[in-house]
Image (tube, rainbow, N blue to C red):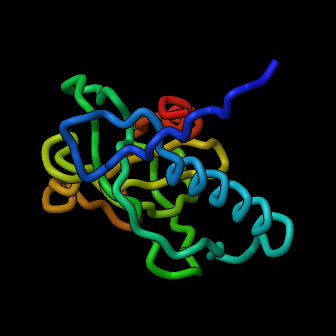
């Protein structure tokens, strides 16, 4: 019995926001790189306040259905330097301090754009609404909101 080669699926065009992507290979690769970089950081220099990531900028569909409007939630991942700062933020819900990495933005969520942060210790994505910056930026830590686990977000597009 002869097997035919599996057809190559075209990569989804993330610039066309009218269609929800089926797969996001760049998001999956970025997530794997992020986890590896943090493990290496923990092994080699856990006291350091930076981790090493590959520089990248790309469009991303964070989720197929955002919690507010059940529509795709678009944004951008932007890592501009290979050494990325781990910063401390505060979870608005339970008040715990979290060490996070800034990843990029969510477009027009929840009202206007929001900054996106990843906490490697619990694999969660957090967001900080930009409109909150004008209203209640507490010192010394941003009050962030829980979004989803990064693993579950990646799983939507595998």
Q: Is residue 149 above or below residue 127?
A: above
Q: Residue furthest top?
A: 1
User: Which quadrant holds the N terminus?
Assistant: top right
How many numbered marks appear?
A: 0
As drawn, is 147 to the left or to the right of 84? left
| Res. 150 image quadrant | top right
For this rendering, which residue is in front, 76 or 127?
76
Q: Residue furthest right?
A: 43
Q: Which residue is drawn at the image coordinates 24% and 23% (left, top)?
A: 70
Residue 119 in percent (x, y) is at 57, 51
x and y, in percent, of residue 56 in the image: 47, 71
* Most foreground residue, 6 or 135: 6
155 or 95: nearer the viewer: 155
Residue 142: quadrant of the picture: bottom left
Q: Is residue 26 above or below residue 111?
A: below
Residue located 60% across and 54% down the image: 29
Name the residue at 52% across, 62% down: 101
Where's the C terminus, which quadrant? top right
17 lies left or right of 84: left
Q: Position of residue 45 (x, y in %)?
A: 80, 75
Residue at 56%, 35% in the rendered image: 7
Query: Taking 120 as reference, is 47 above or below it?
Result: below
Residue 46: x %, y % from top left: 77, 69
Horizontal arrangement in the rendering, residue 72 relative to residue 33 (left or right):
left
């Amino acid at each position: 019995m002869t097997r035919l080669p599996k057809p190559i699926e075209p990569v989804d065009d993330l610039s066309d926001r009218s269609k929800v992507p089926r797969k996001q290979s760049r998001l999956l690769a970025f997530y794997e790189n992020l986890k590896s970089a943090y493990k290496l950081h923990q092994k080699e220099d856990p006291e350091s306040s930076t981790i090493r990531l590959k520089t990248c900028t790309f469009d991303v569909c964070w989720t197929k259905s955002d919690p507010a409007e059940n529509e795709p939630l678009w944004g951008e991942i932007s890592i501009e330097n290979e050494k990325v700062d781990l910063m401390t933020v505060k979870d608005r819900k339970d008040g715990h301090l979290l060490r996070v990495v800034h990843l990029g933005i969510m477009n027009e969520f929840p009202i206007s754009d929001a900054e996106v942060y990843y906490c490697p210790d619990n694999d969660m994505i957090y967001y900080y609404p930009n409109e909150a910056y004008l209203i209640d930026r507490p010192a010394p830590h941003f009050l962030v909101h829980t979004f989803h686990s990064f693993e579950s977000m990646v799983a939507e597009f595998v």
